Amino acid sequence: MTKNKLVTMRFLPQELKEIQSYLRKNPLFTSISSLGRAATMEFIHTRREVALFPQGGFKEKERPSFLWDYDLTEAQVREILRHSPFEERKWLIARILDRLGPPEIFSYLSVSEIKRALPELRMDPKVKRHWQEAVDLWTAKSRKS
């Protein structure tokens, strides 16, 4: 019989709460480990690729033009934006807002993501104010509809 290999998975606090809630409702799984094994094997058997959000329109191995001074690929940037804790991604959000125009920005971020992030971003006050006014205008229009 072969030995089991211990593998560690890290979860954000909110993810861990969701998993624990799921385990309470589904006693078939006795632990995060048993759920993780079942979910991983199901995923491997049913999917060949993971689509990053938003999909399409980018070359994942290329460095984005707004990050000429960082060694990050397009795929890594999108991974950071979708899965890293806010403290680790806010510099990237500020960089996107500072260096790109709206069409490119919205390929990375939604208006609601920009609205949530703005108060915490370190950026030029004039640029920050511009984005705050734009978000206020866009969200006011959506509330009236």
Image (cartoon, helix red, strand yellow):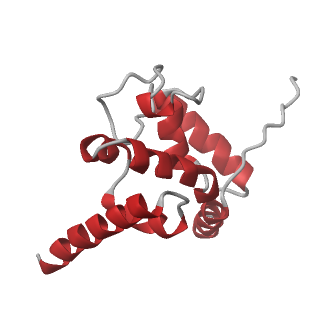
Q: Is residue 86 left or right of residue 138?
A: right
Q: Residue at x 73, y 56 (%)?
A: 31
Could you say which is closer to the camera, residue 83 or residue 38? 83
Residue 128 appears anywhere in the view: yes
In this view, 23 is above or below 74: below
Looking at the picture, does residue 85 appear above or below residue 134? above
* Above/below status of 83 relative to 19: above
Q: Position of residue 99 (x, y in %)?
A: 40, 42
- Residue at horizontal 33%, vertical 36%? 55
Instruction: Please indicate whether residue 54 sits to the left or right of residue 125 in the image.
Output: left
Q: Residue at x 58, y 43 (%)?
A: 39
Q: Residue furthest bottom?
A: 144
Q: Nearer the viewer, residue 29 or 103?
A: 103
- Residue extending furthest left? 145
Residue at 63% across, 57% down: 87
Residue 96 lies, in percent from the top left, at 43, 45
Left or right of 111 in this view: 50: right
Q: Relative to 142, is 46 above or below?
A: above
Q: Quadrant of the N terminus?
A: top right
For the C terminus, the quadrant is bottom left
Q: Nearer the viewer, residue 38 or 98?
A: 98
Position in image of residue 129 (x %, y %):
38, 67
Expressed as whole percent of the image width and height from the top left, the position of residue 103 reads: 24, 43
Would you identify the image quadrant in which residue 136 lies?
bottom left
* Residue 113 visible at all: no
